[in-house]
Image: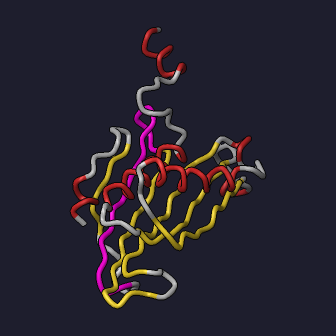
């Protein structure tokens, strides 16, 4: 857990320790994340570390990382048939970029589009992306897994890579 508490993500990602689920494993630790872009929340997530000293056959180990991430999408992306496959690579690429060794990875990517009618009529149609995944770390460096997860959060939220300034943001600040 020390690696999860000590890691410092990029400034747009705010982490907070939260209560871990009690029924999934004898021991747990959980973090909540909020991702801000231009001061507005654009994605959120949870990362949960489960520990069962006896291990689980399906986990292929005694530790398991579980995540749920949600983000609002631009409406034109909601129906993109390639989006789920791309979103999955945000997780695997993020873990690999930070040398976070893992096994037994699995999950789902869900994209939804919502339009309000009648008494619920209101804002324009919305589109959302939900990523649910879990994997078993095969190294003791849990900080690398947190950094990989934060990289996935940033990609899901549409943040530019570290050190890159968005042209829209730059124009707004110089105008």
Asked whether 57 or 66 is in front, the reply is: 57
**Which residue is situated farthest in the top direction here?**
175
Q: Position of residue 33 (x, y in %)?
A: 38, 54
Q: Give the vertical position of 9 relative to 169 (above or below).
A: below
Seen at 58% across and 48% down, the residue is 72
Left/right of residue 21 with respect to residue 126 in the rendered view: left
Asked whether residue 108 is drawn in magenta, I would say no
Q: Main secondary structure of the magenta part?
A: strand
Residue 40 among magenta residues: yes
Q: Residue 52: give x, y in percent of width and height.
A: 34, 85
Residue 17 placement: quadrant: bottom left
Instruction: Tell me which residue sits at (43%, 15%) in the image.
Output: 173
Give the colouring mode of the picture. Answer: secondary structure
Whether residue 26 is situated above or below residue 73 in the rendered picture: below
Q: Please tell me whether residue 160 is drawn above or below residue 28 in the rendered image.
A: above
Residue 28 lies in what quarter of the image?
A: bottom left
Q: Position of residue 69 (x, y in %)?
A: 50, 58
Q: How many marks?
A: 0
**Residue drawn where x is 40% and y is 69% of the image:** 138
What stretch of residues is rendered in magenta? 25-41
Direction bottom: furthest residue = 54
Residue at 62% over, 45% down: 73
Q: Position of residue 101 (x, y in %)?
A: 43, 62
Question: For the N terminus, which image quadrant?
Answer: bottom left
Most foreground residue, 119 or 32: 32
């Amino acid at each position: 857990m020390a690696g999860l508490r000590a890691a410092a993500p990029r400034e747009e990602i705010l982490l907070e320790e939260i209560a871990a689920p009690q029924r999934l494993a004898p021991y747990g630790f959980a973090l909540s994340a909020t991702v801000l872009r231009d001061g507005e929340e654009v994605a959120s997530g949870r990362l949960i570390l489960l520990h069962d000293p006896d291990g689980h056959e399906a986990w292929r180990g005694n530790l398991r990382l579980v995540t749920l991430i949600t983000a609002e999408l631009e409406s034109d992306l909601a129906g993109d048939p390639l989006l789920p496959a791309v979103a999955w690579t945000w997780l695997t690429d993020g873990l690999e970029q930070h040398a976070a060794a893992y096994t037994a990875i699995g999950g789902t990517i869900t994209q939804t589009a919502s339009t309000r009618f009648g008494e619920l009529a209101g804002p324009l149609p919305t589109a959302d992306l939900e990523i649910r995944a879990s994997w078993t770390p095969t190294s003791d460096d849990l900080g690398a897994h947190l950094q990989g997860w934060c990289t996935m959060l940033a990609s899901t939220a549409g943040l530019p890579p570290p050190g890159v300034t968005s042209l829209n943001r730059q124009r707004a600040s110089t105008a």
